[in-house]
Amino acid sequence: MITVVSPAKKLSDNCKAKTNSFKKPEFLNESQELINQLKSLSPIELEGLMGISEKLALLNWERIQNWNPNFSANSTQEAVFSFKGDTYVGLDAESLDKNEIKFVSYSKNIKPEIEKIHNQLKVKRHTRMKSSLKFCVIAAGEYDGYVAEPRAYEWDIAAGHAILKHAGGSISDFNGNEILYGKKDFKNPSIILKSKNIL
């Protein structure tokens, strides 16, 4: 899985790696070239260049002046744990557990019948996601499953069904029945997607 993390204004005070699953940035040489140019600018010049407040310009000037490409596990921290603020409240990186069962959902508000199935499958976390991307992330093993009541049409799930099945996952209705195509009204029944990780 590739995760893109955007920088945040608020950073953690901790500067020590929490895991062994990290790597150094890939564009350190390019970053150094940029820093070399930015170091010659004053906070006022940064304020105009970046279109930011005086306070943020001073904060960025200090970070630029203190920038050091010599990283180690004892002098820095993974980006996902470093960035704080409102943007990262939903991520709650401190509570992430690679062994927990993670599902995707089409809404933040989980309906009782879906929550019941989540509880049966011991789902600990769900992430809102739109379109057939849900099938792909489950097929790739990035998430473990998806549950939906009857909604949408056959053409909305057919391609994703093929991808998931080829990847070793499964799809059924709430009663464990196979999902069939060519129905008269083309409407989907309830569906439960499972990655091969939890079969």
Image (cartoon, rainbow, N blue to C red):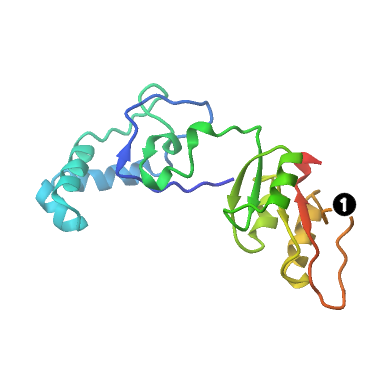
Q: Using residue 128 as the reference point, say whether residue 4 is left or right of it.
A: left
Q: Position of residue 3 (x, y in %)?
A: 51, 46
Q: Position of residue 151 (x, y in %)?
A: 72, 67
Q: Using residue 38 as the reference point, say whether residue 130 is left or right of it.
A: right
Residue for badge 1? 176
Identify the residue at image location x=35%, y=42%: 85
Name which quarter of the figure residue 199 lies in: top right
Q: Is residue 159 above or below residue 114?
A: below
Task: Identify the secondary structure beneath mark 1.
Answer: loop
- Looking at this rendering, what residue extends furthest in the bottom direction? 184
Q: Residues within 10 Å of mark 1 (few under 14, many from 20)?
A: few
| Number of numbered tags placed on the structure image | 1
Identify the residue at image location x=37%, y=39%: 84
Q: In which quadrant is the N terminus drawn?
A: top right
Q: Position of residue 137 (x, y in %)?
A: 65, 52
Instruction: Depth check: give the residue in front, 199 or 73.
Output: 199
- Looking at this rendering, what residue extends furthest in the top direction? 74
Instruction: Depth check: give the residue in front, 36 or 9.
Output: 9
Instruction: Depth check: give the residue in front, 56 or 60.
Output: 56
Identify the residue at image location x=66%, y=53%: 111
Q: Position of residue 146 (x, y in %)?
A: 70, 52
Identify the residue at image location x=86%, y=61%: 179
User: Residue flagged by tag 1: what amino acid is it?
Assistant: Gly
Name which quarter of the figure residue 15 lies in: top left
